[in-house]
Image (cartoon, rainbow, N blue to C red):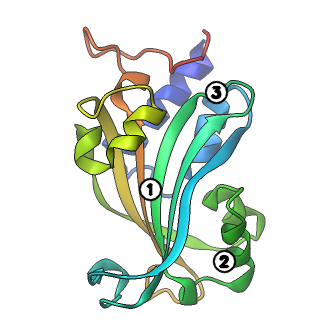
Amino acid sequence: MYLKTSIQKLIRLSFEQPALLSGVFMTPLLEAYAGGPLQVRLISQQLRLLEAAVPELMLDQWEPILERKVLLQGIGNAITYLYAETLIVPGVLPAPVYTRLLQGEEPIGRILQELRLPTFREVIAHGRAFIGDITDGMVAEHFKTCPGADVLYRTLLLYVNQRPQCAAMRITEVMPWAYVYDRQDGSATLAPGATG
């Protein structure tokens, strides 16, 4: 119970005080909390041209981008622990990373760790919001909640050593607030499906 509570506090900190844990990928934390491996469920992935400039990625309108939307779910129970939406700059990533990302079956952090690529993460936004305000309505359904449900989120830029002056991706991670807080008194509670 103590270990789960400690991991839960780290998960909460990664959203509430992300500068303290900006170098932490969520997948290992969530796997420790869930008590087993998680799988990536690919919602969508498409290479497209940008309809508007994305200054934080140093991209202008009509430049190519790989947009990836995934869920991190328990393997045996299909509980959704995290939603992530990523804009990836294809030309900035090393070819092995880009190839594995296109397969859509692995978390980004796991790929980067296995390839031993040095990275730097810069948090550009974080907080608490309604899920419908920062994602489309379909995401709420994956968490079995409504668009008005509270979520914790963080958006970060991920730099890979190949081109440190330009971020390789912008990642927004979303987790329901109720997964780490009890709604009545604000104290911590177990994530869905977890036992203490």
- In terms of depth relative to the viewer, which is nearer, 49 or 37? 49
| Residue appearing at x 56%, y 52% in the figure | 25
Mark identifier at residue 174: none
> Residue 99 occupies which quadrant of the picture?
bottom right
Q: Position of residue 16 (x, y in %)?
A: 32, 41
Q: Secondary structure at mark 1?
A: loop
Q: Amino acid at mark 3?
A: Ala
Q: Nearer the viewer, mark 1 or mark 2?
A: 2
Q: Earlier in the sequence, mark 1 or mark 3?
A: 1
Q: Earlier in the sequence, mark 1 or mark 2?
A: 1
Which residue is identified by label 2? 98
> Residue 38 occupies which quadrant of the picture?
top right
| Residue appearing at x 71%, y 56% in the figure | 105
Q: Secondary structure at mark 3?
A: helix
Which residue is identified by label 1? 22
Q: Amino acid at mark 1?
A: Ser
Q: Secondary structure at mark 2?
A: helix
Which residue is identified by label 3? 34
- In terms of depth relative to the viewer, which is nearer, 60 or 142? 142
- The 10 Å Cα crowd at callout 1, few under 14, some 14 to 19, many 20 or more, is many
Q: Is residue 79 above or below residue 116?
A: above
Q: Is residue 180 visible?
A: no
Quadrant of the drawing holding the N terminus: top right
- CA distance separating discs 3 and 2: 28 Å
